[in-house]
Each structure stands twice: as structure tokens, then as C-alpha cells.
Image (spheres, helix red, strand yellow):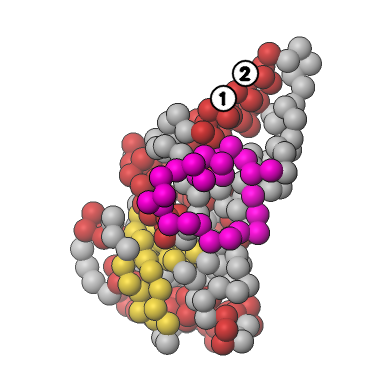
Amino acid sequence: MSADPRQLAEYLRFLRELGVEDTAISSDIAARLVAANNSPAATPPAPEPASPSAKAAAAARRAPAQPAPAPRPAQISMPGNDSFPIALADASGPGRADGADPAEQLRQIRADLGDCTRCKLHAQGRRQIVFGVGNPRARLVFVGEGPGADEDAQGIPFVGRAGRLLTDMIEKGMGLRRDDVYICNVVKCRPPNNRTPENDETAACSPFLRRQLAAIRPEMVCALGAVAAQNLLGRRGPIGGFRGTVHRLELEGFTTRLVVTYHPAYLLRDPSQKKETWKDLQIVMRELGLPLPARS
Ligand code: URA
């Protein structure tokens, strides 16, 4: 495990920004920081033991009102430790009894999309189609609005500043690995100047998004921002009207659950809303049976 004090301090700062104060995990990190700083040679603290970590133990001590987490193949430990993120992808997830190969289905959907010219975005400066990234058997899918400049350049969703924040939310906040979830957008081509996608553009791209979700069959979808929420739920409204509820999301031959939170780009403009986002992410974690920080 890397126990670089700066890394630990950064992790603690991130948790505090989310409003995760005085939890077992942050106390544990604080103790490690003190230990690391007091050590003459700044010797990294010993690696996490193989037994359940403080966070998992704290989760286990919580009130029995919490639904018992489903058995997980991984433990929770510290960031930098290979065992830190919970292995979220689950080959035996719902819908997998149909014997379908979601990776192959995603390849087929990407092939059907082709060098898409179905809407005007193809002629408005897009460099490439940004299809989606992550585990085809993910239990959790994040859906954003549309690629920005970095995503357009790299062909991967959420890799710019907002993407780094999303990655932190997934990895440092939720304790998962980005690679274990799936991440995609409502529109697959960059709208010029990062404007909001227009109705004809979302209408052209939505069938592909819905097919992606139906292929993956995630247990939960997290819509990032109002555009994703409105598109997936099929109704207009401010983001406040969508948050705080576990919605039903009907897809072709498959129903799943959807939670709405703020778009990371909005959080970069208004970091005070990170605490609200953390509340939404905790709903997702609870629904997935993931352990929450002991007190937040
Ligand atoms: N914003 C989005 O909605 N999607 C991305 O992929 C990047 C930024």
C-alpha cells in the first residue's frame, strides 16, 4: 500500500469536502497521517491487514436497520492498496441468467452507431464518437450529458476536470474502482462550445444509450445532471425535483433503478453542493448494499 502522507491528506480533504466528518475511515486516515508525520524516516504505515478494515468493521457495527450488504468478493482498505476499492462488477448480476454477453452486445451497439451522422453534431466539429467506458457487467452506470473537449480528443467519457472529479467521487467517495462501473453520456458527440445538447440530438442518440443500459443491465443508474435525468426519465423538470428519490427506469425488456445527482461540472462551479451529491451517492450505495462510512 502506498501511504504517502500527501495522498492520505488529499483523501481526507476530499472526504471532508463531501461532508464525511469524523467517520471511522477519516479517523483512521488521520491516525495514519500523524503516524507518518511523526516517524523520523517518514516510514509508511504498515499495510492494511487482510482482516476487514476499519471502514468495513464500522459498517458492520452500524444499526441493524441497514440492509445486510450482499457478499462481496473484496474488502475495503486504504486508497493505494489494491484491495481498497470494492470490486463492484459482478458477473452474476441480474439479467446475466439470460446467457447474453454484454461485452459483445456493446460491440454490436457501437458497430450499429458506426460513423454516425444521425444528427447535426457530426458536422459541428466532433473529432470522434465517445461511446462509453467501463465494465460491460457493471452493477452501476453513470450517465452524463455529452463529451467535452478532453473527451472528444481522447474518445473516453469524463476524462477532463469534471471527469477527474467524477473519478474521485467514485473511488475516494464511494470506495469503488472507476474500471468496475460503466460511464457514458446521453449524446456521444461533443456539442460545440460544450453547449447543452438539443432535442433532436438527444432524440437521435437516446436509443443507443438505452440499448447500452439494456445490454449492461446495471442494478443502478446514476444520472449526472438534469439533461441525463430528463432524458432517461422522459420528463422535464429542474434537477431538484429528481433528486432524493429512487426512480424506476424502464428499458427494453428490463427495469432498473435510477438516482439523480448534480453534474460534476456544476460541482466544479459550486463546490458547496458536493455535500448534497454525497447524499445522493449514499442512496446509490445503500441501494447496492455497499458499506457506508460510519457517520456522515
Ligand atoms: N461532461 C459530460 O457530461 N460528459 C463527459 O464525458 C464529460 C463532461
> Disc 2 vs disc 1: Cβ atoms closer than 8 Å?
yes
Locate the C terminus and report the quarter of the image it occupies: top left
Residue 247 is situated, as x and y percent measured from the top left of the image, at 31, 67
Indicate whether 254 appears above or below 249. Answer: below
Locate the N terminus and report the quarter of the image it occupies: top right
Helix, strand or loop under label 2: helix
Residue 30 is situated, as x and y percent measured from the top left of the image, at 56, 24
The amino acid type found where label 1 is placed reads Ala
Q: Where are the magenta residues, as a range?
A: 51-75
Crowding around mark 1 (Cα neighbors within 10 Å: few <14, some 14 to 19, many 20+) is some
Q: Is residue 114 visible?
A: no
Name the dominant secondary structure of the magenta segment: loop
Q: Residue furthest front?
A: 64
Residue at mark 2: 34
Crowding around mark 2 (Cα neighbors within 10 Å: few <14, some 14 to 19, many 20+) is few
User: Which disc, if any, is residue 30?
Assistant: 1
Asked if the magenta segment contains residue 126, the reply would be no
**Closer-to-camera residue (171/201):** 171
Indicate whether 67 appears above or below 24. Answer: below
